[in-house]
Amino acid sequence: IADSVIEALVRHVAAKFDAVRKVGAVRIRRTEDKDRAVLIALDVTLRYGVQIVEVIRQVQDAIKADVEYMTAMNVKAVNVEVKRLTID
């Protein structure tokens, strides 16, 4: 499965959340160990006023679950970095 497919899936899942206003860079790294897992990192812009820790935890869980389900790949970590907050 190409990294671009995983990236598109990550963007789609993150965009489902109302608090996520924009998904920036998405980085996919594959491990070389026997698990052949993937590490996912992404930058997001959140809506001002949301509980950041709770939203990020939900985004991480949703991305991990959907990527594992749709690709049958083990997701070792989902690192989400909040780059900015926006007021709409």
Image: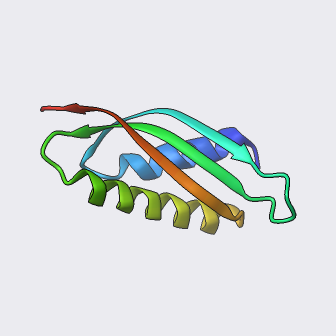
Please count the marks in the image: 0
Residue 53 position, x and y percent, is 29, 56
Between residue 87 and residue 51, name the one nearer to us. Answer: 51
In the figure, is residue 11 to the left or right of 39? left
Q: Quadrant of the C terminus?
A: top left
Between residue 56 and residue 72, name the one nearer to us. Answer: 56
Q: Tell me which colouring the rendered structure shows.
A: rainbow
Which residue: 25% across, 49% down?
18
In the figure, is residue 31 to the left or right of 64? right
Between residue 29 and residue 12, name the one nearer to us. Answer: 29
Residue 4: image quadrant is top right
Residue 16 position, x and y percent, is 35, 52
Residue 60 lies, with reference to residue 12, above or below; the image says below
Which residue: 16% across, 39% down?
48
Residue 35 position, x and y percent, is 81, 65
Residue 71 lies, with reference to residue 88, above or below; the image says below
In the figure, is residue 38 to the left or right of 49? right
Residue 1 lies, with reference to residue 58, above or below; the image says above
Residue 33 position, x and y percent, is 85, 58
In the figure, is residue 38 to the left or right of 56? right
Which residue: 66% across, 44% down?
5
Which residue: 28% across, 60% down?
54
